[in-house]
Image (cartoon, helix red, strand yellow):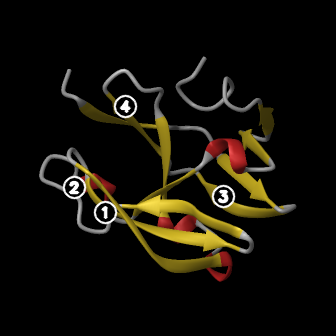
């Protein structure tokens, strides 16, 4: 297995923040990185675009590249994505992740998930 791998997440995944949907997707992917728990990445187009506010915050990952960030309301830099990902993880372009424990709630196929244990790949 490579250090970073991705798998499709086949359930209908939804997260809410401040009582409103932040994203709703059937096209999530799980990023498996080293020994870290898998992280759901969501197509940016499946986010509620009206809620995303791009920031100038940026971080660098030696395996994925430079991350761009978006805030949602009072939640600074809560969404991130790799707009120009490194070779080998090109699939990340157009996808973004969220700080899972900052969401109000998650559902998979309409069933509530417990954070963090119930999130994809963490069972």
Q: Is residue 111 above or below residue 87?
A: above
Q: Which residue lies at the image location 77% right of the left edge and 59% below the top edge?
A: 17
Q: Which residue lies at the image location 63% right of the left edge and 32% below the top edge?
A: 119
Q: Which residue is mark 3?
A: 24
**Tag 3: Cα neighbours inside 10 Å, few (<14), some, or many (≥20)?**
many
Q: Which mark's residue is nearer the viewer, 1 or 3?
A: 1
Residue lying farthest to the top in this orientation:
123
Q: Which residue is mark 4?
A: 32
Q: Nearer the viewer, residue 31 or 60?
A: 60
Left-right relation of 102 to 45: right
Q: Which residue is mark 2?
A: 90
Q: What is the C-alpha distance between the residues marked 1 and 3?
A: 18 Å
Secondary-structure class at tag 1? loop
Q: What is the C-alpha distance between the residues marked 2 and 1?
A: 6 Å
- Mark 2 vs 1: CB contact within 8 A: yes
Q: Which residue lies at the image location 23% right of the left edge and 59% below the top edge?
A: 85
Secondary-structure class at tag 3? strand
Q: Earlier in the sequence, mark 4 or mark 2?
A: 4
Image coords of residue 103 (percent x, y): 73, 50
Q: Earlier in the sequence, mark 3 or mark 4?
A: 3
Q: Quadrant of residue 68?
A: bottom left
């Amino acid at each position: 297995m490579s250090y970073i791998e991705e798998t499709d997440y086949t359930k209908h995944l939804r997260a809410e923040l401040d009582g409103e949907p932040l994203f709703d997707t059937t096209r999530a992917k799980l990023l498996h990185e080293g020994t870290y728990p898998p992280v759901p990445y969501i197509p940016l187009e499946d986010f509620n675009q009206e809620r995303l506010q791009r920031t100038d915050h940026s971080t660098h990952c030696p395996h994925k590249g430079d991350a761009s960030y978006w805030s949602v309301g009072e939640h600074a830099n809560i969404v991130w994505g790799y707009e120009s990902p490194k070779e080998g993880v090109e699939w990340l372009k157009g996808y973004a992740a969220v700080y899972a424990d900052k969401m109000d709630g998650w559902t998979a196929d309409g069933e509530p998930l417990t954070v963090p244990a119930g999130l994809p790949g963490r069972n």
